Every structure is written in structure tokens, then in C-alpha cells.
Amino acid sequence: MADNDYDPAGSTQMFRAFVDETPAPQAPGSVSTYGRSSGNRTGVIALIAVLGLAVVGAVIWLAVK
């Protein structure tokens, strides 16, 4: 049996409603994915700084030697 009342725009309207929904606010004190990514970024920056200092120290040590 064919569905004669099929609305092809209905799925588009439902998709737009889904996209336009605002995300639910998070509870205070909960960890968000943004907090974890900034922590990872801080660790990477600190690692790069330490490696840079090690390279500069090695160059100075070789120059003095």
C-alpha cells in the first residue's frame, strides 16, 4: 500500500529543527571536552618549550666545548 501523504520536505524540516537546537547547558563542575583539549594543548606547549630549551642548551654546550 503506497503512502500518498508523504511529505518530502518533512525530513528537511526535521533536520533543520535538529540543527537549530541549542545544546543543553552543562552542570557546574562538570568536565567539558573544551577543558580537556585546552589541558592537552598546554601540555604540548610546555613540552615544546622544554625541548626548545634543551636544544638551545645543547648548542651552547657544544659552542663552549
Image (spheres, grey):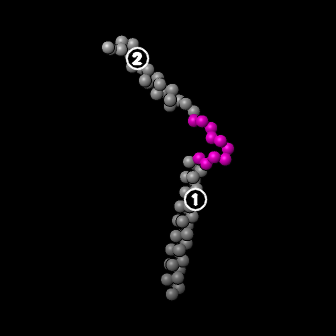
Earlier along the polypeptide chain: callout 1 or callout 2? Answer: 2
Q: Provide the major secondary structure of the magenta segment.
A: loop
Is residue 9 found left or right of 58 in the rendered image?
left
Which residue lies at the image location 63% right of the left edge and 41% below the top edge?
26
Q: Residues within 10 Å of mark 1 (few under 14, many from 20)?
A: few
Residue occupied by mark 1: 42
Which residue lies at the image location 36% right of the left edge and 12% below the top edge?
4
Check disc 2 and report its element: helix, strand or loop: loop
Please give the label number shown on residue 5.
none
Task: Give percent across and percent down for residue 15.
Answer: 46, 27
* Camera-nearest label, 1 or 2: 2
Check disc 1 and report its element: helix, strand or loop: helix
Which residue lies at the image location 53% right of the left edge and 80% below the top edge?
60
User: Marks 1 and 2: CB-CB under 8 Å?
Assistant: no
Residue occupied by mark 2: 7
Task: Give percent across and percent down for residue 9.
Answer: 42, 20
**In the displayed image of the protein, which residue is found farthest to the left?**
1
CA–CA distance in space, label 1 to label 2: 51 Å
Given residues 51 and 62, the one toward you in this image is 51
Residue 43, picture quadrant: bottom right
**In the displayed image of the protein, which residue is found farthest to the bottom?**
65
**In the displayed image of the protein, which residue is found farthest to the right?**
28
Question: Is residue 47 a member of the stretch shown in magenta?
Answer: no
- Quarter of the rendering occupied by the N terminus: top left
Span colored in magenta: 23-32
Given residues 27 and 65, the one toward you in this image is 27
The three-letter amino acid code for the residue at tag 1 is Thr
The three-letter amino acid code for the residue at tag 2 is Asp
In this rendering, is residue 46 above or below 10? below
Given residues 15 and 3, the one toward you in this image is 3
In this rendering, is residue 5 above or below 34? above
Question: Is residue 25 a member of the stretch shown in magenta?
Answer: yes
